[in-house]
Image (spheres, grey):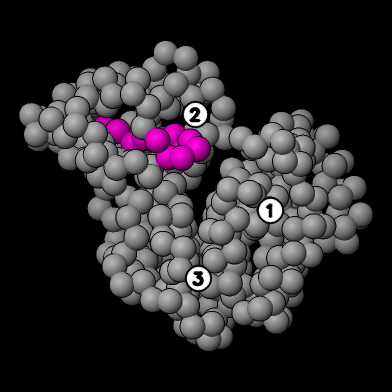
Amino acid sequence: MNLPIGRLAGKLALPQPYLLFLGDTTEASYAKTAFGLADWAADRCVGELAIGGCTVSTGLPRLSPAEARAAGARSLVIGVANQGGIIGDNWIAALVEAMEAGLDIVSGLHVRLGSIPALIEASRRTGQRLIDIRTPPPAIPIANGRKRNGKRLLTVGTDCALGKKYTALALHRAFLDRGLDADFRATGQTGIMIAGGGMPMDAVISDFEAGAAEMLSPDAPDDHWDLIEGQGSIFNPAYAAVSLGLLHGSQPDVFVVCHDPSRTVILGMESFKLPSVEEVIDLTIRLGSRTNPAIRCGGVSFNTSSYDADAAEALMAAECKRLGLPVADPVRGGAGFDALVENILA
């Protein structure tokens, strides 16, 4: 049942397969769109393209635009989600080359493709499309705070880019495997590309954030679950507004805290210490109870990609005992993840 809600725009019809553009990225967290598509929509990706200075890779074949087109690609997806959502001047030549090779350009960045003269000219010359997906639907209402039917889970984070989308997707898959009626509700560019619809929360005018979240997960049958992809962190000095609007509008019955235990400071804002899992649980309950007094924490999702298997298992076991909650890595799965799912459903 993983379909867009009727009140949102129709299902995205993006030109597929994709060539994933990594630009000149040196921080894997800023290439999360490329990694997300490679991990969750691998059947729609033929390869990756990077320019000078890039040090990250999804593991897909490195292809030129012409090679990707010959391999069946129909579009180049900008796989970078950098601070500010900007398109680097040094990317333009590669994007123009992609259009000249017969690829449309798909972007979820804040800066619109159609605002860049060189891309407009190349589009007119080649006939290839410039597709911006970070566009909210029209007529988003102001939130009303009314309690809705159905069940909702929201992933929240100690920071940005550490696993909220992966956790929601993994939980959605686990719910479906258990025969439950569930939808993944995308709130960011990558999730929208994967799901084929959603709400680009950080492109919504602030006054309408909570209303957009209500629109994203409307009334549903009592046994239906919406697994809502979180955004940012309520502790992030730059992005907390989006996180709070999503929390209030989602009215989650259950939330899962997502955390990268290898981080000590906020990504891109190194003067700010990363909050603890306990701080996130406490503040999420205090703020979230404004629209759902019954809100509870279902457990913790760890991103242990920088740990080996034994170290990750030992760390999660220790944190589970310390916090008194299930702690699991949804990518590694296993008994810990099963325990997290069961506690959410309890």
Q: Is residue 198 above or below residue 13?
A: below
What label sits on residue 139 in the rendered view?
A: none
- Was residue 73 drawn as part of the magenta stretch in this picture? yes
Q: Are the residues flagged by discs 2 and 3 in contact, CB closer than 8 Å?
A: no
Q: Quadrant of residue 287?
A: bottom right
* Mark 2 or mark 3, whichever is nearer to me: 3
Cα distance, mark 1 to mark 2?
Answer: 29 Å
On the image, numbered disc 1 is attached to which residue?
A: 235
Q: Earlier in the sequence, mark 2 or mark 3?
A: 2
- Is 46 located above or below residue 148 in the figure? above
Q: Quadrant of the N terminus?
A: bottom left
Q: Position of residue 198 (x, y in %)?
A: 40, 61
Q: Residues within 10 Å of mark 3 (few under 14, many from 20)?
A: many
Within 10 Å of the Cα at label 1, are there few (<14), some (14-19), or many (20+) other Cα atoms?
many
Considering every residue shown, the one lying at the far top of the view is 52
Label 3 SS: helix
Identity of the amino acid at label 3?
A: Ala
Residue at 70 percent of width and 50 percent of height: 158
Q: Quadrant of the C terminus?
A: bottom right
**For this view, does 236 lie left or right of residue 6?**
right
276 and 3: which is toward the camera: 276
Which residues are the magenta region? 71-86
- Judge whether residue 23 can be spotted in this image: yes
The x, y position of residue 15, in whole percent, is: 24, 43
Lower sequence index among marks 1 and 2: 2
Helix, strand or loop at label 1? It is: loop
According to the image, label 2 marks what residue?
58
